[in-house]
Amino acid sequence: MQHDAKSSSHAGLNVAVLVTVGRHPVTARARRADQDARAVEMALSLNDAAVRLVHAGGNGDDNEEALRGYLGMGIGEINLIKQASSADVVPALVTSLRDMAPQLVLTGTRAETGEGSGLVPYLLAEALGWPVISGLAQVESIEQGVATVLQALPRGKRRRLRVRLPAIATVDSSAPAARQSAFGPARRGELAARACASVPDELQEQWHVQPARKRPKRLKIVKSASARDRFKAAAAKADSGSGQLLSDVSPEQGAEAIFNLLKEEGVLR
Amino acid sequence: MSDIIRRDPRKEWIARNRLHPEHLEVLAELGGGASPSEWTGPSGLTRRNPHAVGFIGPNGIKRIDRSGAQQAANQPGSRQAQPKDTRRRVEIEAPAFMVAVVPDLSGGRLSSHDRDLLGLARQLADADPERPGAVLAIVFGTHKETTFGEAGVDRLLEVQGDAFSGYLPETRIAALQSVEREMAPHYWLLPDSSLGGGELGRRLAVRLGERPATQVWQVEADADTDTGWRCTARGAAGTTDIARAMPRVVLALAECAEPVSETRHAAQPVELAQALPEVLGRIEDMGEVAVDPASVSLAEAEFILSAGNGVKDWDGYHHAAQVLGATKGASRVAVDDGFMPRDRQVGATGTWVSARVYVAVGISGAIQHLQGIQSCEKVVAINLDEGCDMIKRADLSVIGDASEILAALVARIERYREEQQENRDAA
């Protein structure tokens, strides 16, 4: 029902969401990618927006299952651009987006499979000549072709940006979590497949890909002329008990000490 | 104090003459201690008195401390070996090529990530001693950093102007493009961080038409590739390693190389010959937004006030968190007892936090909880029990009743806010 209400209001904003097939971090099963699902959620929460989903890539059974995860969020269909599994999807996406002419393109910051470099939005923006903004946390308003958005910064901070549409925006992990995917709509939804010439990614074929190795821990190298200093550094225990202990103090004195530390660290606003 | 040894022949003569009435004073003055075991003799030779070595321990036995701690304590600032700056000074007059680095400079200073990146740049620049390259650091806006030379920067390009103070990726990219045109760096290195480096690097790579290597954590020499270097990058959300030839533009992770420590560099300022182009930005920065600390997720909160079993006055705790502007956290016990919601639980089963300041109120510090706060920088503990594990972890611990201390802290902070308000009104 919700979907029907959305798709009938074509007068409003035209939003395209680029979705990929994700990978569960623990079970490694194909799933809807987390950030892409958040992008779909963000698009669905916009007022008066006609949301269209675009996926370019190979199609296996796993992939279809994962893509149906997006359909279960209340989407009627996904435009599926069929590509060879080792293809560069950017040219196909550029043509597709030119045809569709959306005002806003949303996507996750980086894919959960493949190279996962997070470059696609930038390449698309360069090819289409649109501005690109990264790490969206919220779309505040869209008025007269200008979107006011909140960009997520580290440590939970936010920055307000204003961008002229059409634009491409990547969605950060701190955007609102995606709604659950319902089974029935996921079955009923349609994958509208369309063939498109695929451009092979030649560079990628020269790469050697293997499961991630654990990164070596950095050694603490002590550069000191004196053997005594080097020995002391090597034999030193992990720093514990180095903290300041205030016992038998009045609450006011204790509070003063804590206050000084908070002020020193600059966390008091 | 100057390093020239000045001899006083009269004092030396007194020091030799044990019958001289001033013998002991002079000896003490020359040797620096009460019973000197070493002094410089008249011929410049070091003389030793083995009987004067050591001190009488508490049980009346002579002890000799060979660790040097005793002697170091006995020499009050006299001719002690000052830690000399042994770093080699390197100046590269005519570099064969440039390696451009755009550090994040978060908070106006080089972060450890930036230093690692500069270390990697040095590695690339110094690979061939016949053709040394120069590391060019490009810095936007005002900064507080003074140690660019020690971090390994040969040339420093400071792009100043009001236009570079905020978030203006398009203007910055235009500036970097001018650098590319004028200096044509051999490599571009940027930090793959969420502080802006990752985004800027991707924009730059796309604009230059280069395919960058992202999330690079290792770079090795490899003669088979075009650039002579091979890099290992993380792919697929950190689950795969991609070994590939190193491209011109590299976005590297933290700890990709060792920071520079053995050399000092010139950090010679350079300028662009042409003025920077005016860019009509389509992205407008409206400034940072004040965020309600309660809505910040625990994992990315900067300042957490966490409550445990020791908290009895919950209203007081919530009030304190509000006044402090801290994000609320809780230990498992507080959550299980229903005082705090489950999503606020810190620890192995809850959220692993990375706060800069973590205040633990009435939390004894179970190992699961301590795991969750491993990456916190400063931990403050307020607790009644002096022997608990949280006190061992904490940088500052206050022993006492939690509600009283929190109330005093709230009063102190309200007073501080009032003072600030008055200052502002006066100004």
Image (cartoon, grey):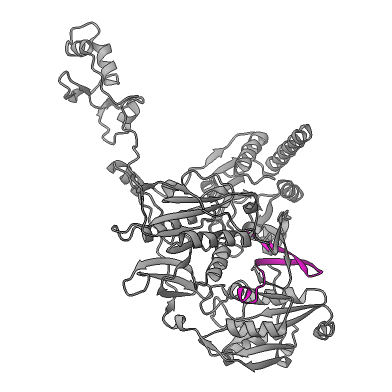
* Residue B220, quarter of the rendered image: bottom left
Rendering coords of residue A220 (x, y %): 38, 53
Q: Is residue A6 visible?
A: yes
Q: At 33% across and 37% down in the image, what residue appears?
A: B84
User: Residue drawn at (26%, 13%), measured in percent from left and top?
Assistant: B26
B284 sits to left or right of B267: right
Screen quadrant of the C terminus of chain B: top right
Q: Position of residue A55 (x, y in %)?
A: 64, 85
View extreme (left): residue: B43
Residue B30 or A147: which is nearer the viewer? A147
Residue A148 belongs to magenta span: yes
The span picked out in magenta is A124-153
Q: Residue furthest top?
A: B21
- Quarter of the image where the N terminus of chain B is located: top left
Q: How many marks?
A: 0
The residue drawn where x is 84% and y is 80% is A11
Residue A202 highlighted magenta (yes or no): no
Residue B270 percent across, percent down from the top left = 48, 49
- Relative depth, front residue between B142 and B58: B142
**Residue B331 visible here:** no
